[in-house]
């Protein structure tokens, strides 16, 4: 049904989207916390930077990633030398591009859920003797769980569909950086590739829809478990 | 003992307050916006004074001069909000147990079973906060704060969000826990009845300033002869003993040195001390103690003072047998018709229906889940 190359693209897409989403959550949570609760000079600047990937043309974001994380770029060279992490023309680069593109969506969803929490609940927890980190872990985090789940699904779906920044940053190398959208693009550039493009498009739609359902189910379950626990 | 001496300036609101609370219940009393809640937040450590000092039982919680500032979770102060603020993702039992982990074993003075019993929340333990009534939530919130064995309990208008029926449901519990657990309470309220019933000390606040500190009868008495609508808030606080109940009529007779006071409701137990508040506008003055009226309460007293600012009203202060003061607002017209003068003895008639049962203790607690 699927050629070996198509399977590779599907598996790579899932790997890239999963890693990108999971790696983003802690950073997105921290950023959302700072934006929701922090009061400091330059907060709107930080907010703007976080939202930049949403408003910039993806090609620009990809190019900026190349300038920053490329093999000879300052950050890229540093990471390669000290940690052996190489982004350029690797699947890791695709994951980085997907993570960056999905980041504003995730931050937005988490931030909204944090802002919706009544601060007096945290004050009540503090008055009961709980230190701040415990309040965060037992009150803030559980109450923001829905927002975190929603943000993760959005970011995952975005990562599955990411094309512009990825192809600019890590190109379109089958087996290495060719995700589903890149493979679809390749089909559309090939005579007689319409059927392949259709198949992969259906796969992309199914995966995105599946992620949505999984998240709905897990949120509903988290709600019930929270009640029982 | 809590000692507060703070000043704070925020968005055009200025708070300058100093007072001390002894054991028992200290009420912060005053109209909304007078700074009561700000003081609660300062004591809890949720806000910081611009300058000042807060000391609890010899422990400095805040001192802007020495830079001492104890974090809220290190203060050992329980906090009960107006609207419970139970953790919605935890069960009642988990809410109650939340602070237990942070209370060192040797400090756990409050017994969990006893709290559950006193507050009557044994049947709620497995439930979620969202499924509780307002009164039940507030009781759980009180229990949650109590179970950390705090050195001080802060209650910020714990009854304000409840309807009258629920207030009646909670008041006996607050009274009971004040006596049963011997934890000092700082209690914010703008209700005269609550304050008169519960407080040992009243701190009266107005516009960010403390205007009076003292026993309820002194602080709640009318402060000046006034023609303004303030007269509706002036009360006298009387204390007597429960003498007899009259189930046929649903009233209780309270023995007072100046006469018998009939109050609504069946109070128990016979012989118990009972405090009640009488609105100054609910007192009628008469020459004799038994004129032909439906009023059953007539107290004899000597007119100690008559004050008027020349408006339609006069404030008459009676000294009752036993030394308590009873304040009465009457019209100057009526006073002149009566011909009463300072030093004379008159009868004060009090309508039973005008006595708010919320000011009475010992009322039967409504059954759980009723109404």
Image (cartoon, rainbow, N blue to C red):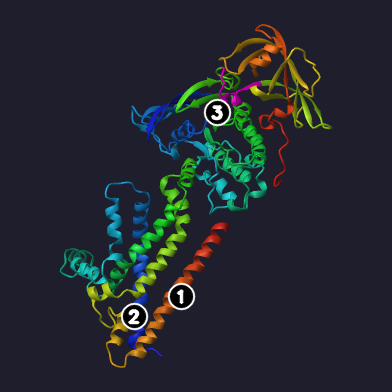
Query: Which residue is at 73% across, 16% downward?
Result: B299
Residue A51 at what x, y percent from top left? 30, 61
The answer, for residue B108, to whether it is visible in the render is yes
> Regarding mark 1 in the picture, which secondary structure is present there?
helix
Q: What stretch is highlighted in magenta?
A: B225-237
Q: Tell me the number on the disc at residue A210.
A: 1
Q: Are the residues at dot 2 and dot 1 in contact (C-beta closer than 8 Å)?
A: no
> Regarding mark 2 in the picture, which secondary structure is present there?
helix
Mark 3 to mark 1 CA distance (whole Å):
58 Å
> Regarding mark 3 in the picture, which secondary structure is present there?
strand
Q: In which quarter of the image is residue B332?
A: top right
Residue A107 at what x, y percent from top left? 36, 60
Image: B105 above or below B281:
below
Q: Tell me the number on the disc at residue A180.
A: 2
Label 1 marks a residue whose chain is A
Q: In which quarter of the image is residue A57?
A: bottom left
**Residue linked to disc 3:** B27
């Amino acid at each position: 049904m699927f050629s070996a190359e198509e399977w590779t693209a599907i598996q790579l897409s899932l790997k890239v989207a999963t890693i990108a989403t999971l790696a983003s959550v802690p950073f997105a949570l921290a950023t959302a916390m700072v934006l929701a609760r922090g009061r400091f000079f330059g907060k709107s600047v930080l907010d703007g930077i976080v939202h930049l990937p949403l408003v910039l043309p993806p090609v620009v974001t990809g190019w900026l990633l190349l300038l920053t994380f490329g093999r000879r770029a300052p950050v890229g060279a540093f990471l390669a030398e000290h940690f052996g992490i190489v982004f350029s023309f690797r699947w890791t680069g695709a994951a980085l591009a997907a993570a960056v593109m999905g980041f504003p969506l995730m931050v937005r969803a988490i931030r909204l859920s944090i802002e919706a929490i009544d601060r007096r609940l945290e004050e009540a927890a503090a008055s009961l003797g709980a230190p701040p980190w415990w309040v965060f872990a037992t009150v803030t985090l559980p109450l923001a769980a829905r927002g975190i789940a929603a943000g993760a699904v959005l970011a995952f779906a975005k990562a599955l569909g990411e094309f512009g920044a990825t192809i600019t940053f890590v190109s379109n190398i089958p087996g290495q950086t060719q995700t589903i959208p890149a493979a679809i693009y390749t089909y559309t550039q090939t005579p007689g590739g319409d059927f392949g493009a259709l198949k992969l498009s259906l796969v992309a739609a199914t995966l995105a829809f599946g992620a949505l359902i999984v998240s709905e189910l897990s949120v509903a379950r988290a709600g019930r478990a929270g009640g029982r626990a | 003992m809590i000692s507060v001496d703070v000043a704070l300036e925020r968005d055009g609101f200025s708070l300058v307050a100093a007072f001390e609370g002894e054991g028992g219940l200290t009420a912060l009393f005053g109209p909304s916006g007078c700074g009561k809640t700000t003081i609660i937040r300062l004591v809890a450590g949720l806000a910081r004074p611009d300058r000042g000092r807060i000391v609890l039982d010899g422990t400095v919680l805040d001192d802007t001069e020495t830079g001492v500032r104890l974090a809220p979770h290190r203060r050992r102060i329980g906090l009960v909000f107006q609207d419970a603020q139970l953790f919605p993702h935890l069960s009642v039992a988990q809410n109650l147990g939340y602070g237990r982990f942070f209370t060192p074993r040797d400090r756990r003075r409050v017994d969990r079973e006893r709290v559950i019993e006193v507050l009557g929340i044994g049947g709620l333990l497995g439930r979620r906060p969202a499924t509780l009534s307002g009164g039940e939530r507030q009781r759980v919130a009180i229990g949650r704060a109590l179970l950390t064995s705090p050195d001080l309990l802060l209650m910020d208008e714990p009854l304000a969000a409840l309807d009258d029926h629920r207030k009646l449901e909670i008041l006996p519990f607050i009274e009971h826990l004040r006596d049963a657990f011997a934890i000092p309470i700082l209690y914010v309220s703008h209700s005269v009845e609550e304050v008169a019933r519960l407080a040992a000390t009243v701190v009266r606040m107005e516009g960010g300033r403390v205007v009076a500190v003292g026993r309820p009868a002194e602080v709640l008495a009318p402060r000046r002869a006034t023609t303004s609508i303030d007269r509706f808030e002036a009360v006298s606080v009387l204390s007597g003993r429960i003498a007899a109940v009259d189930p046929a009529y649903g009233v209780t007779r309270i023995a007072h040195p100046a006469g018998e006071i009939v109050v609504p409701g069946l109070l128990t137990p016979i012989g118990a001390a009972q405090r009640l508040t009488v609105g100054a506008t609910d007192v009628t003055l008469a020459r004799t103690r038994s004129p032909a009226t439906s009023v059953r309460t007539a107290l004899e007293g000597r007119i100690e003072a008559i004050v008027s600012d020349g408006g339609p009203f006069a404030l008459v202060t009676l000294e009752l047998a036993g030394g308590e003061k009873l304040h009465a607002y009457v019209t100057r017209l009526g006073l002149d018709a009566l011909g009463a003068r300072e030093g004379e003895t008159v009868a004060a008639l009090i309508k039973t229906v005008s006595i708010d049962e919320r000011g009475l203790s010992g009322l039967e607690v409504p059954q759980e889940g009723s109404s």
